[in-house]
Image (cartoon, rainbow, N blue to C red):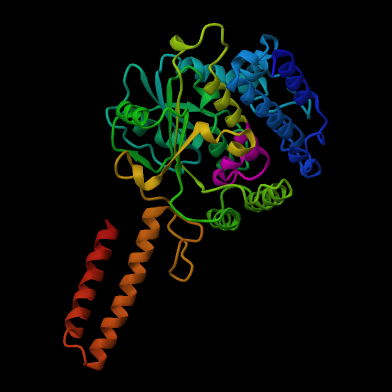
Amino acid sequence: MGPSTMAVLLLGLTSAPPGAWEAWGRSERAGVARCGKFHGCPSLAARNASIRLGQACVWAGAFPAELPSAHAAACAGERFLSASMVDESAPYCGFTSQLALSWLARLNALTSHCSTVVYTVITGGYDQFKQVPGGPQPDLCLVGLVDNVTAEKQTHAAREIGWQLYRLPTPTPWPNSPARTSHSLRAMAMRMFPRAAHTIYCDGKVVLLKPPAQIVHELRATTSAPYIVIEHPWSLSFMNEFKFAATRIRYQRRGDTQRDVDDVEAQRRVYCEEGACNNQAGMLDATMIIQQREPRAVWPAGRTEPAPHVSIRWLECAWFNEMAIFSHRVQLSFFFAVDALGLRRQVHVVPRRQWENKLFQIARHKYGALVDNASAPVAMGKTAHSRRARRKAAFRTALAAARAAAARGDAPGGVGALAALKAGVGVRRAHEAR
């Protein structure tokens, strides 16, 4: 494939009608715009155009010699700095308003000196800021993206442990869906921190056990992939996750609950129409998301951006669009975006058990586990909460057996076992009360 062929491919993908590519054209009729003053108006037409252009750019990045210079800006960072994307069928990646671009520019300036950025997003005071081992360093920034409610409650405590708080615009990008605001921003590290060599997103429940510099060093020794994520510990099928996501949304009751549940069902329907119901292996655990980028000093001569940076930008774009148009539940859309762009080789997936209690721990969540018949968690919580639920179920079973043995009198240790279990109840309740 020569330069002229690549130019035709890029032009064809950006100008193709919605139905030109079967995989990304069959669901145009299902798109409903969700307009706002910050991110503009995402639609299925724009989402499909973004996937088509992203596919071409990722392919071109794999063969940089064949990317015409006239089209380099269409694939690299400059493409994302324009607020002129007002055509519904034009590629869309959010942040289309002048308000959004000004907000991004201020954040870029605040963190321009940071080689490593650790960041989190907290809305509504939903989580607490955690201590980071080693604290902030000259080339390490701890950035908390917060709304006004969180800023009023936690500014003093966060600053005492080294976090810089950066306020979201008022109103927030999706005022009726705080979860959508926080979930979508966690996916946009390249847009928010373009000069950093490493970014580490930490969920509000994550407690880092090692300094970020050491974590980065250990990851570099493990993989050179630019995008590193954690695999969810639950062995759930893709279709089951849609059911569990709707259950969790109803339980949490954050924002417009019914609208969020409807979004889950619309996403499931569209994915099945596009043939994506059965081709996603595993599930994302979005507690930590890490990017490894090439420092600007080692960029190839004459290149606008290294190929891995182009891949990350378009992955962020595709993932953001799924959360903007469909459900904000990150597990439902991440691997769809990865597969749509053909980026499995650029994404390194690590089982959570390989990192947990080594690089990080998960603090107690605001919500506990939802347990179905004392079996696996249905929709709530994380591994720690499922273990707690199983311990409680095992304790109840043992207590019932000890009572039955004591009542029958046919188990010499029955009475002693019952007394021990009752004493254990007091100890456990006193521990939980603390």
Instruction: Please state the total of marks drawn on the protein image.
Output: 0
Q: Residue at x 27, y 65 (%)?
A: 429
Q: Is residue 223 rendered to the left or right of residue 57?
A: left
Residue occupying the far top of the picture: 302
Q: Is 1 placed above or below 232 here?
A: above
| Residue 101 pos. (x, y %) | 61, 19
Name the residue rendered at 44%, 59% in the picture. Answer: 369
User: Which residue is at a point 61% across and 41% down the rendered structure image?
Assistant: 336
Vertical position of residue 142 compared to residue 285: above or below: above
Decide whether the magenta segment is chiefly helix, strand or loop: helix
Residue situated in front as seen by the camera: 402 or 7: 7
Between 351 and 3, which is closer to the camera in this rendering?
A: 3
State the image coordinates of residue 434 (x, y, percent, origin top left). Answer: 27, 56
- Quarter where residue 11 is shown: top right
Percent from the top left, x then y, of residue 16?
81, 28
**Does the magenta-highlighted stretch encompass residue 32?**
no
Say left or right for 6 vs 208: right
